[in-house]
Image (tube, rainbow, N blue to C red):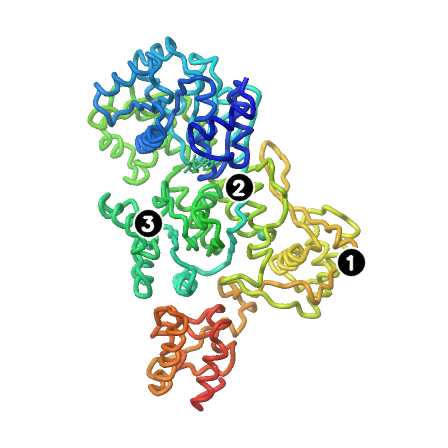
Amino acid sequence: MATALDLKQRLRSAFGHSAFRPHQEEVCRRTAEGADGLVVMPTGAGKSLCYQLPGLMRGGPTLVFSPLIALMEDQTAKLRELGLRAERIHSGRPRSESRQACRLYRDGEVDFLFIAPERLGVPGFIEFLERCRPALIAVDEAHCISQWGHDFRPDYRLLGRRLPRLRPAPVLALTATATPRIQDDIAAQLDLDGDQRYIYGFRRENLAVEVVQKRPGARAAVVREVLGEEGRRPAIVYAPTRKETEALAARLDEDFPTAAYHAGLQTAQRDEVQGAFLGGEIDVVVATTAFGMGIDKPDIRTVVHTALPATVEGYYQEIGRAGRDGDAARALLLYSWADRRTQEFLHKLSYPEVEVVSGLFGALGDEPREQVDLRRRLGLAEETFEAALDQLRIHGGAVVGGGYRVRRGDDAWIRSYRVQRQLRLDQIDEMTRFADHRGCRMLRLVRHFGDRADSGDRCGVCDVCSPEACLVRRFRTPLAEEVQAMQTVVSMLRRRDGLGTGRLFKEFHAVHGSYDRGAFEDLLGALGQAGVAFVEDDSFQKAGETIHYQRAGLTPSGRRRGVDLAEQVLLPDDPPDEPRAGRRRRSAAPIDISEADADPALVEELREWRGKVAREKRLPAYTVLHNRTIVAVAAAKPGDRDQLLRVPGIGPTTVKRYGSALLRIVAAAGKADPK
Ligand code: ADP
Ligand code: ZN
């Protein structure tokens, strides 16, 4: 039996680490003792050690399933550097080398053997492993086994059926991304014994999450403003389409070195961008979600999403790339209601109606058929046909063979397709609810993954916990009438704790008719932020469907009436997302300026001031204020902070930092012209 001392000694002697990272010891000890388990910890937490150390303790060999050749190569190389005996078998190696790896494994000369799951389908291979059973089985990137995950790989299915033949070795499944639902699926498919789960480490103390509604047309300017500030770069900006990455990259590149990255670029180009970013020659990469796998750059200060991501899991992985060095970092998500419609549209493209896919399935036979003929016969648009065929193939309803001809597969496809199609829609829903959530962002993310050892505390740095630190969101103190409305909410909650927010709104609306649901949610969110009330998600089952809703209640300090609502509560003051009749405030409209109005003398003075600031702070001048913005200020001649804020290119941070200086210069030039 492995004692704590043995483990620790081996940690040092084999891996050169002086101490365990949080929770590694627990996993290592139990796995070394022979228990199955599921590890869900974020990237960089040190998951590999969780199977490597117990593998050695159990006297090896450890069989590791991995989805990607690059990952296998990488892990093998790292283990070899430590002087451990690692081998891998994959399609990228000559046959003779793979045969040699098998021989070494058979002769007990290998500590770790990496293979892809599809290898289990190669005739004779499973029989070979049955003869030389491993001491431990590790399934890396285990979320790939679940069709509900965002990276489902059909080959992983083989594992569920074949692993029992390699037992009695314990199985340890590992992944950085699995919601409780996907965790259940992994545990069931791999038939993990005892349901031991290690779900830890999702809280990121140094990452401030900010989510703000912005209409699509306004987002590029916000990104430019935010990243223009000193200390906000290096940064990754995630944009939804290839075209948008290129357009935005070109715009940002005017201010600081920026490049686009997406799957449409040549491999060499992609490598170049990645290399330049890692090497510090490029400050910002504007990318689709194709960017990031394996990016280990510790000093990324900001991750921006210019649109609503498709899943919370994907979003969490992407923002998790910021601040790996432990210094403060920020994740900024810009979205609007229009984004949800875009996501639903994209969903429709990738997941055609079940009837359409059924139609294709019906047209297939045991004899392989040409794709073009099938498409013509069904009269489908190319895009729809491709999507339908893709889905049919993934779910086993079609087999694509030589010459890309297609034959009929298994008719069980329809059940799993239905489930997955719906699941993707649910994920969009989940992401929208995350964005609209008015409680602590980090807490919400931690709960999403079902972190088992989390404190449950608010993070203290997100847009909800720390409104004053926001880059883009703005807040204000409530009006007297809003204080009254909040008092109504509090007294209603005092009478009925844990009320659904829908019910609460109905009762509230009967008293305060002028508040719509959004305004009411703002009040409730502000009360939550001030620690008076809480809002939490809940759900119930109705006719086989999960209905999500929110409940609200008072916190202990809310019950004690310890908070002064007029003084301590802040309400969001974001400009309305889309112009809505009656809600659009005049101050939200940008000042109408023509550059011809710019007074050349004032432009000169502003430039001079900028030069001085830049020299003092040792910054490039454009990071203080862009030329364009200087011209705009000189043309608008703002008389106060509010007017200054409406000048194109000027954001809240600039106002905060340089507002008084700018206004002074404008006023001194005698040109201040309050409109
Ligand atoms: P994950 O698979 O969770 O993304 P890795 O297993 O690749 O993370 O580990 C990330 C890094 O942390 C690696 O460089 C690894 O060597 C290092 N690491 C893991 N455990 C420890 C430890 N106990 N002490 C110090 N470094 C560690
Ligand atoms: Zn928070």
Q: Whole-Å distance between the Cαs marked 1 and 2?
A: 33 Å
What's under tag 2, amino acid-wise? Phe
Q: Earlier in the sequence, mark 3 or mark 2?
A: 2
Residue at the spot of label 2: 202
Instruction: Give the left or right position of residue 482, taking residue 315 as reference.
Output: right
Label 2 secondary element: loop
Label 3 secondary element: helix
Residue at the spot of label 3: 278
Q: Whole-Å distance between the Cαs marked 3 and 2?
A: 25 Å
Quarter of the image with the N terminus is top right
* Image vertical order of residue 194 relative to residue 360, above or below: above
Residue toward you, 402 or 292: 292
- Could you tell me residue 225's position as x and y percent? 41, 65
Residue toward you, 461 or 395: 461
> Which of label 1 and label 3 is nearer to you?
3
- Could you tell me residue 406's position as x and y percent? 27, 25
* Image vertical order of residue 625 relative to residue 485, above or below: below
| Disc on res. 360 | none
* Residue 360 in view of the camera: no
Q: Residue furthest top?
A: 131
Q: Earlier in the sequence, mark 1 or mark 3?
A: 3
| Disc on res. 561 | 1
Q: Whole-Å distance between the Cαs marked 1 and 3?
A: 52 Å
Say few, some or many: other residues with alpha carbon within 10 Å of mark 3 (under 14 / 14 to 19 / 20 or more). some
Say few, some or many: other residues with alpha carbon within 10 Å of mark 2 (under 14 / 14 to 19 / 20 or more). many
* Image vertical order of residue 353 relative to residue 88, above or below: below
